[in-house]
Image (tube, rainbow, N blue to C red):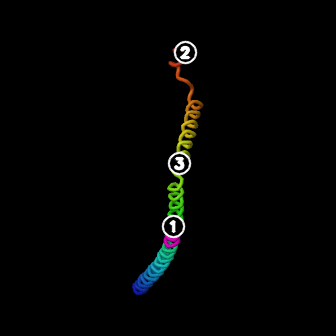
Amino acid sequence: MKKQIAELKREVTRLNRMLSDQAEETAHGWYQSATDRASGLYSGATARASRAAKQLRSQAHSVSETVQHNPGTFSTAVAMGGLVGVAIGLALARSSQPAPDWLHRWQR
């Protein structure tokens, strides 16, 4: 009986080792797969960011040239944009908050 128990213990130990090895191999495979995917995503993002930076640089250069050739037009456009922004801000401020109560007392 003791001999059979010892054999069973050895068998359980061997099975535990096999399961441990398989789990390690599976985990390593998952890790490698995740690493490969992350590397692919990173290289794709790097390429897209590089293209976007080149496009932004090109657009900034063309805007800069336009401003240099037409400074009056640019100044007028900025001033008009500022006036429109102020008008929108004033309209939103008036419509979003009712007049305070103390203001009504002075207007009577």
Q: What range of the chain is rendered magenta?
A: 41-54
Residue 86: image quadrant is: top right
Residue at horizontal 50 percent and vertical 58 percent from the top: 64
Residue that mark 3 sits on:
72
What numbered label is drawn on residue 107? 2
Between 17 and 94, the one lying in front of the other is 94
Q: Quadrant of the C terminus?
A: top right
**Residue 104 is one of the magenta-drawn residues:** no
Residue at horizontal 51 percent and vertical 71 percent from the top: 47
Q: Give how far across and how far down residue 50 sits, in percent.
A: 50, 69
Number of other residues with Cα within 10 Å of mark 3, as a class: few under 14, some 14 to 19, many 20 or more: few
Between 40 and 74, the one lying in front of the other is 74
Which type of secondary structure does the marked residue at label 1 adopt?
helix
Q: Give how far across and how far down residue 58 sits, in percent.
A: 52, 64
Q: How many marks?
A: 3
Labelled pair 2, 1 in contact (Cβ < 8 Å): no
Number of other residues with Cα within 10 Å of mark 2, as a class: few under 14, some 14 to 19, many 20 or more: few
Residue at horizontal 59 percent and vertical 33 percent from the top: 91
Q: CA distance from mark 3 to mark 1?
A: 28 Å
Residue that mark 1 sits on:
54
Amino acid carrying label 3: it is Gly
Nearest to N terminus: mark 2 or mark 1: 1
Secondary structure of the magenta portion, mostly? helix
Q: CA distance from mark 2 to mark 1?
A: 59 Å
Amino acid carrying label 1: it is Lys
| Pair 3/2: label in front | 3
Labelled pair 3, 2 in contact (Cβ < 8 Å): no
Between 83 and 98, the one lying in front of the other is 83
Above or below — where is 67 with respect to 81?
below
| Pair 3/1: label in front | 3
Amino acid carrying label 2: it is Gln
Q: Give how far across and how far down residue 28 sits, in percent.
A: 46, 78
